[in-house]
Image (cartoon, grey):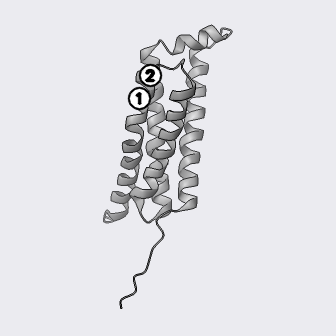
Amino acid sequence: MVEQKSERKFHFLGVLLGIAVDNLGTLISTSLIGGIYFANRPVDEQDVSVIYSNVGLLLLLMVVGLFWSFLGGYIAAKVAKRAEYFNAAIIGVIGAAVGFDSMLTNHSIPLWYELLGFVVIVPVSLLGGFVALKLKKAPLK
């Protein structure tokens, strides 16, 4: 009987660092964008709800957030050095879960924005894992 060696796929530190990069990067970036958007004027709840009607700003925030999800997937895969797609996908699944919770609880954010983010976050995180894997296999020049 041949004994198969089972290799652990999940890499705790890689996923933890990927989540940290994704969440902290998104938080800092959106705070900076919000700070620039509201520069030199007091902010009240009415002003914050105006953000959700500004399609251009929402798209900018989505691109920035997805960049951090890509980078989080890349970091998770790079640190894991094994099962790169699996570890990168975890970043996207966690992001999708957060987005799904937001869809259920925060009704001020437009549904199209929530759904678009929900649909693309896992593929974007997987793209980060793909890049990490390709760079790992790329020959040194």
Label 1 SS: helix
Report x, y in % for residue 87.
Answer: 46, 56
Q: Which quadrant, please, contains the C terminus?
A: bottom left
Tally the marks.
Answer: 2
> In this orientation, does residue 59 appear?
no
Report x, y in % for residue 72.
Answer: 49, 47
Image-based side of 106 in relation to 139, left or right: right
Contact between marks 1 and 2 (CB within 8 A): the answer is yes
Amino acid carrying label 1: it is Leu
Q: What residue did someone put label 2 on?
A: 111
How packed is label 1: few (under 14 Cα within 10 Å), some, or many (20 or more)? some
Q: Which residue is pictured at 67% across the width and 10% down the height?
A: 44
Report x, y in % for residue 127.
Answer: 36, 47
Vertical position of residue 61 compared to residue 8: above or below: above
Along the line of sight, the residue nearer the viewer: 70 or 103: 103
Amino acid carrying label 2: it is Leu
> In this orientation, does residue 119 appear?
yes
Q: What residue did someone put label 1 on?
A: 115
Q: Quadrant of residue 77?
A: bottom left
**Residues at marks 1 and 2, CA–CA distance in whole angstroms:** 6 Å
Image-based side of 47 in relation to 113, left or right: right
Label 2 SS: helix
Vertical position of residue 89 compared to residue 47: above or below: below
Q: Which residue is pictured at 48% across the width and 70% down the height?
A: 8
